[in-house]
């Protein structure tokens, strides 16, 4: 593997990397727009009900039962034995509609309650949470998410311009947009629910990806002083190879920490870890195969003073 990358022309094969990215993004986003993205109630507004069932339940069977009541819902399980059911709908239910559904679930699963409305078996709360999220809150969350991403990108742009040069900044931000689109494509293709943890994961991946990209750009800058007679293409290829083991090992270390948490963690943490894992893999790919080749193309587009590529 190492011998392969020691000879691999990263810049020379850049068009294949561009093509792969375009195909993945177009297929994913196209599937998302055609079938619709699976937006959670954090964005669309709706109703969330959390019930302590007092027993292990099957989320699919509970979803089917709720569907027979005329309500489309997504059910996730929490608790040590999956006894807590989190029911989310994209429809705003009134208090009476919520209580009607709760009573139907209680009757179907033969849940015994005491006079205080708690579980007769252990006195725990049956209705752990019941909330309504209006669509205006979802719109506000979308706007704030875009603002947060814009502020992060602007801060990185300023830093990279000061630390390196404006061409490095432009291509680094373009690479970050590539990573965000790749994550959105994954969610669109596999219809994974998009909610607030998704936004947190995107911001985490943006910081992670820019770190890998800056490491390569820093090596490119150092090699410009050491390899003055080399062509830009060769200089960039050498810089990527010199930082390749660091980039891959950093990503593998992160993945090794994420995968066990995803397997053993609950549904809430999985909603954060899944996009994080996808983003880490996509960010590693873009740092190696997209960022520096983009810099090469932009450099040759603007001027060709000392470094002449093919």
Image (cartoon, rainbow, N blue to C red):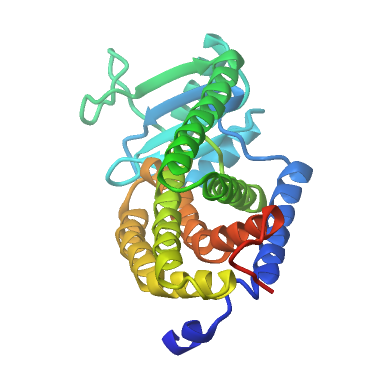
> Height in image: 100 above or below 168?
above
Quadrant position of the C terminus in the picture: bottom right
Query: Left or right of 36: which side holds 219?
Result: left
Seen at 45% across and 70% down, the residue is 239
The foreground one among 16 and 52 is: 16
> Height in image: 45 above or below 265?
above
Seen at 62% across and 58% down, the residue is 294
Where residue 124 sits, quadrant-wise, is top left
Where residue 150 sits, quadrant-wise, is top right
The foreground one among 284 and 163 is: 163
Residue 302 image point, x, y percent: 68, 52
Query: Left or right of 79: which side holds 43?
Result: right
The foreground one among 266 and 72 is: 266
Point out the residue furthest to the right here.
Answer: 34
Residue 139 image point, x, y percent: 60, 19
Residue 69 image point, x, y percent: 63, 29
Quadrant position of the N terminus in the picture: bottom left
> Height in image: 162 above or below 46?
below
Point out the residue furthest to the top here.
Answer: 95
Seen at 52% across and 28% down, the residue is 145
Residue 76 image point, x, y percent: 46, 40
How many numbered markers are drawn?
0
Point out the residue furthest to the left here.
Answer: 122
The foreground one among 292 and 34 is: 292
């Amino acid at each position: 593997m190492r011998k392969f990358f020691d000879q691999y022309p990263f810049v020379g094969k850049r068009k294949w990397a561009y093509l792969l990215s375009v195909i993945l993004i177009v297929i994913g986003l196209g599937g998302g727009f055609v079938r619709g993205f699976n937006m959670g109630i954090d964005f669309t507004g709706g109703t969330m009900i959390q019930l302590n069932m007092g027993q292990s339940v099957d989320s699919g069977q509970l979803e089917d039962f709720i569907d027979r009541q005329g309500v489309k819902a997504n059910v996730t399980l929490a608790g040590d034995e999956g006894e807590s059911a989190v029911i989310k709908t994209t429809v705003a239910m009134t208090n009476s509609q919520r209580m009607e559904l709760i009573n139907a679930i209680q009757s179907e699963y033969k849940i015994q309650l005491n006079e205080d409305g708690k579980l007769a078996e252990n006195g725990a709360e049956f209705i752990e949470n019941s909330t309504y999220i209006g669509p205006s809150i979802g719109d506000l969350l979308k706007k704030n998410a875009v603002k947060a991403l814009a502020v992060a990108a602007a801060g990185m742009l300023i830093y990279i311009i000061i630390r390196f040069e404006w061409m490095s900044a432009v291509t680094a931000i373009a690479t970050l947009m590539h990573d965000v689109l790749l994550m959105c494509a994954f969610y669109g293709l596999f219809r994974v629910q998009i909610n607030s943890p998704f936004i947190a994961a995107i911001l985490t991946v943006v910081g992670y990806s820019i770190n890998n990209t800056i490491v390569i750009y820093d090596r490119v800058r150092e090699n410009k002083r050491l390899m003055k007679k080399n062509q830009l293409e060769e200089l960039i290829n050498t810089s990527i190879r010199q930082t390749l083991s660091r980039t891959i090992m950093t990503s593998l270390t992160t993945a090794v920490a994420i995968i066990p948490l995803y397997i053993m963690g609950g549904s809430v943490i999985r909603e954060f870890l899944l996009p994080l894992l996808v983003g880490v893999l996509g960010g590693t790919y873009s740092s190696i195969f997209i960022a520096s080749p983009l810099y090469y193309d932009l450099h040759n587009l603007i001027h060709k003073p000392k470094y002449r590529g093919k």
